[in-house]
Amino acid sequence: MSLQLSVCISAYGEPLFLRSVCAQLSELAFVDAIHLLDGPYAFCQEIYKDCGFYGDEAPSPIRAVAEEFPKVSYSFAIHPDERSKRIHLYQQAQGDLVLLLDLDEVPLSISMEALQQFWDSAYSVAAIEMLNIISASVREQKRAKKYALFKRESIRAEEHLDYTWLVGVNQNAPNPARMMPLPVLQVDHFFLLRN
């Protein structure tokens, strides 16, 4: 059996890196699909409309990028909250492994060897190593670990939330025995700070 990776990207806003990420991932034979879930949270909708951002329909830049790549599955919805959006996104995955990314995260290296090593391990959750790049008048780089790779059949959609960094979402304590200690892949994470 050939190991398959489903990549799930939570989106809302400007697709600065989306085209290059979709192009890179589309070339990998073991990536079965790239699921792009777009849309704001319901509680933000009126604020976004008042500020001139879209609210009820998909913005053409993100939709246009998604349409360029056959492996990309695109959907747009108004989500009640972050929890429901993340669960919906995870449920779209059909691959053996699920990689969750945000729109500001760019994979640097994804090797089948590293994915296979994780798959063959007793762990159900693996981390990505993030190089947090902070853009402002001074550029800082900080490394961090984020649990964003899951064995789909071992971790339910609701359960994956316990291993992710989310603000304002009720989470249970993660089970350390299920977490692979070393990161499996690397990503650049771009914090875009405005002066």
Image (cartoon, grey):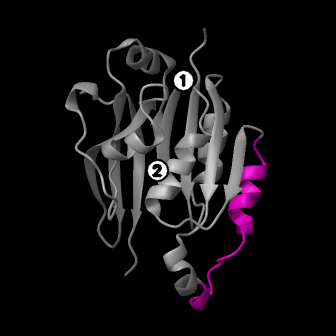
Disc 2 from disc 1: Cα separation: 21 Å
Viewer-side residue, 173 vs 110: 173
Residue 151 coordinates in the image, percent (x, y): 45, 26
158 magenta-colored: no
Q: Which residues are magenta?
A: 49-69
**Rendered position, 7 above or below 181:** below
Name which residue lies at 58% across and 60% down.
16
Of callouts 2 and 1, the N-terminal one:
1
Q: Quadrant of the C terminus?
A: bottom left
SS under mark 2 = strand
Name which residue lies at 70% across and 43% down.
72
Residue 163 lies left or right of residue 176; in this view the side is: right
SS under mark 1 = loop
Residue 54 lies left or right of residue 165; in this view the side is: right
Q: Quadrant of the N terminus?
A: top right
**Rendered position, 95 above or below 72:** above
65 magenta-colored: yes
Viewer-side residue, 27 vs 36: 36
Q: How many marks?
A: 2
